[in-house]
Amino acid sequence: MSSQAIREELCKYAQKTVSNKLVVGPGGNISARFEGKMYLSPSGFALDEIKPEQWVEVDIETGAITDIGLRPSSEVLMHLYAYRQNPKIGAMVHTHPPYCIAFTLVEKDLPIMFPDQAALVGRTVYVDYVLPTTDRLADAVVEKIEHSSILLGNHGLVTTGRNLREAYYRTEVVEESAKIFLIAKAIKEPKVLTAEETEEIASLESEAYRIQLLQKMK
């Protein structure tokens, strides 16, 4: 793996994020860690417009921009604090998925309802609305960064993973979970998995194998 490969991987998942309507316009931001640096989407760009050389390199320890060029995303502190707090995080995906946002307008606790959600994401936590792009939001996210998915009230979703693939697919699964919940809730109270059922899924050898595949870079 090289910094160039990381930049190309970021372009790949940025394009998937836009094509799957997890953001619109210049919304959202994604990043990946590599050798003490993070590579973050630049400010003012739609994610699918970013070229490999335009991802902004930031030193994680000092916060210094270590290459010449564009300004980092306005959510730079959220990404920076997360990498400092949890060395296991290799990538972060922050999006504005419509069903996730809709969910936060009416609920806070997203229950675990189906096997993919249980195995690939687990518990999704919630942060009350905080003004975007501020250190207050960065602090609020970092307080819960041990969880791999965080719903932001009236705002969107943050997911993390050991790599971009894992972080991105967690975004897809949480958005699908919010969609399923809202559809079911419109009819009657959804039946959710019990803690015991969730643990049984997590202990399956087949699920452990699938998770290992997601954690591989390619």
Image (cartoon, rainbow, N blue to C red):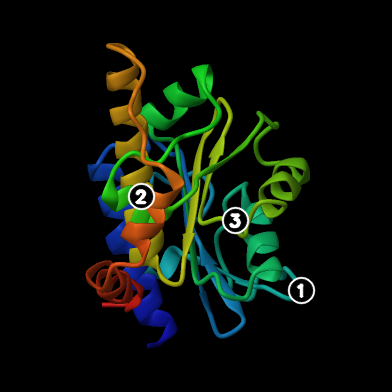
Callouts 2 and 3 close, C-beta under 8 Å: no
Residue at figure coordinates x 39%, y 66% from the top left: 164
Q: CA distance from mark 2 to mark 1?
A: 44 Å
The answer to whether 170 is drawn above or below residue 193 in the figure is below
Q: Say left or right for 113 vs 156.
A: left
Which quarter of the picture shows residue 174? top left
Q: CA distance from mark 1 to mark 3?
A: 16 Å
Mark in front: 1 vs 3: 1
Which mark, residue 62?
A: 1
Callout 1 secondary element: loop
Q: Say left or right for 66 vs 117.
A: right
Mark in front: 2 vs 3: 2
Mark nearer the N terminus (1 vs 3): 1
Kind of residue at disc 1: Thr
Residue at figure coordinates x 52%, y 22% from the top left: 107
Callout 3 secondary element: loop
Which mark, residue 197?
A: 2
Percent position of residue 124, x then y: 50, 45
Q: Mark 3 highlights which residue? A: 71
Which quarter of the picture shows residue 62? bottom right
